[in-house]
Amino acid sequence: MRSREERGVDPAAPAEPVARRAALVVPLPRRRDTVHLAQALAPALAPGDLLVLTGDLGAGKTFFARALLRALGLPTTVAVTSPTFGLVQEYAARLPVVHADLYRLGSPDELRELGLRERRADAVLCVEWGAPYVADLGGDALELAFCLEPGRAVVLRPGGARARGLARAAAGGPDRRAARARGRAC
Ligand SMILES: Nc1ncnc2c1ncn2[C@@H]1O[C@H](COP(=O)(O)OP(=O)(O)OP(=O)(O)O)[C@@H](O)[C@H]1O
Ligand SMILES: [Mg+2]
């Protein structure tokens, strides 16, 4: 398989153009802050929503996806593991949720074979390493860019009107300290 660089895939590129002032940053110093972020976002979600999780290895994408599924009522008896090898895993939470990890995706053709875009008709899509494929997945994604430096945080970058509402919900939890994401690199 060709490397991501050979394929011209830049995982650090923003998923969609976004007005700078629309991006919000929420600090996540403790695991429980990531759990609170998921709990704030979950009630606002509906089938058709696209969440794209970006950030370095170990930045907290799968941890967030698991917290989101728990916040959507998935019992702890159902394990949520990284779908890196199978690429896609589906869960029957309060809403159907499709959790994908596209790190090892070979090409946009392979993406079409996975049928992810079609799943937006009836499920929430939560896609790790999905930034290069937002257009193929139908756009209007909320990108959640998890950063480790200068401290754990998430930058919320909405790519459309629906995603802007989701960003406000995620940033508006009880003890949130969201701020404009000026100057954040990730
Ligand atoms: N505030 C925090 N939020 C999320 N995870 C945290 C936090 N603090 C520590 N961690 C730990 O960081 C790790 C994040 O790993 P995770 O598998 O979620 O990363 P990832 O971004 O999905 O990586 P990959 O790109 O390899 O899929 C977990 O071990 C988690 O317990
Ligand atoms: Mg992961």
Image (cartoon, grey):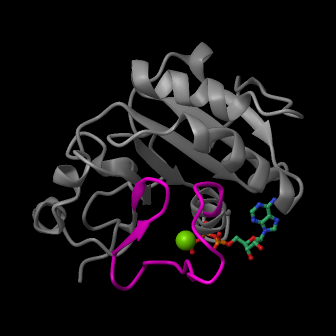
Q: Which residues are magenta?
A: 70-97
Vertical position of residue 47 compared to residue 24: above or below:
below
Q: Quadrant of the N terminus?
A: bottom left
**Horizontal relation, residue 83 to residue 38: left or right:** left
Q: Please provide percent x and percent y for residue 21.
A: 61, 14
- Magenta segment includes 73: yes
In the rendered image, residue 28, in percent from the top left (x then y), is placed at: 82, 49
Q: Quadrant of the C terminus?
A: top right
Majority secondary structure in the magenta region: loop
Position of residue 42 measured from the top left corner of the image (x, y, whole percent)? 59, 44
* Residue 160 located left or right of residue 175: left
State the residue at coordinates (49%, 39%): 45
The front one of 88 and 185 is 88
Left or right of 176 in this view: 139: left
* Residue 163 is one of the magenta-drawn residues: no
Q: Is residue 88 left or right of residue 150?
A: left
Location of residue 68 by image quarter? bottom right
Q: Quadrant of ligand 1?
A: bottom right
At horizontal 59% and vertical 39% (from top left) the residue drawn is 43
Q: How many marks?
A: 0
Q: Quadrant of residue 64?
A: bottom right
Query: Residue 112: image x %, image y %?
Result: 12, 60
Q: Nearer the viewer, residue 31 or 145?
A: 31
